[in-house]
Amino acid sequence: MKNKQWVWAFSGAIFGLMISAPAMADGEGLHIIQGGPSYFNIGLGAFNAAGVTPGPGYTNSTLPMINLEYQTGAKLFGIGAVYGLLANTNGGFMGYTGFYTDVAWDHWVLTPVLAMGGYHQGRGKYLDGTFQFRLELSLDYQFANQSRFGLKIAHISNAYIKESDPGEDEIMLNYSMPLSFGEH
């Protein structure tokens, strides 16, 4: 599948999860977490994990990265706000804000994120512009103390609002710690 088709399929899946979140019924099995603690997330992993060509004059390398993210505990219809920052070892970074929801089943939590923000390339990947969209999907195991640990994948794209859309994919280990305790 071409990069553009993959981006639209991934975007549609994230958007669909977020829109259908309030419609899912609480009860046994799969449910939307309506409230609870705010979370501070730390992700460590690979920037440009898929190795997509970065553009003229830049190396096509996968770089170590860190992702710091704050998710609000307050939600409206199961959807909360998210604020984040990521940085790679070649001076590239992105600040972003957007929306998220938590879909839980037993001790597992699936968290889609739809965000937008500003990207600075540094000596890293060329993404054809500062304004970018960010899509994330994490699957975490939630422990009894409400902390979570799991795997996160993410994609940065300008959604073809520029002439080209090189895109960038990430994979990382994610740890989420609750900042306040509430009901879930």
Image (cartoon, rainbow, N blue to C red):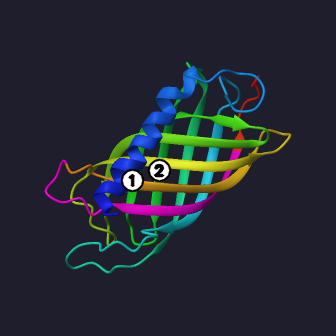
Looking at the picture, does residue 129 appear above or below residue 29? Answer: below
Which amino acid, mark 1? Answer: Met
Kindly identify the residue that appears in the image at 62 percent across and 35 percent down. 102
Regarding residue 24, the answer to whether it shows in the image is yes
Label 2, label 1: how far apart the Cα atoms are: 6 Å
Q: Secondary structure at mark 1?
A: strand
Q: Which residues are magenta?
A: 161-176
Locate residue 47, reporting x and y percent.
46, 67
Disc 2 vs disc 1: Cβ atoms closer than 8 Å?
yes
Regarding residue 99, the answer to whether it shows in the image is no
- Picture quadrant where residue 156 is located: bottom left
The image's mark for residue 76 is none
Kindly identify the residue that appears in the image at 64 percent across and 49 percent down. 139
Between 33 and 124, the one lying in front of the other is 33
The residue where tag 2 is placed is: 85
Kindly identify the residue that appears in the image at 67 percent across and 28 percent down. 33
Image quarter where the C terminus lies is top right
78 left or right of 179 in image: left
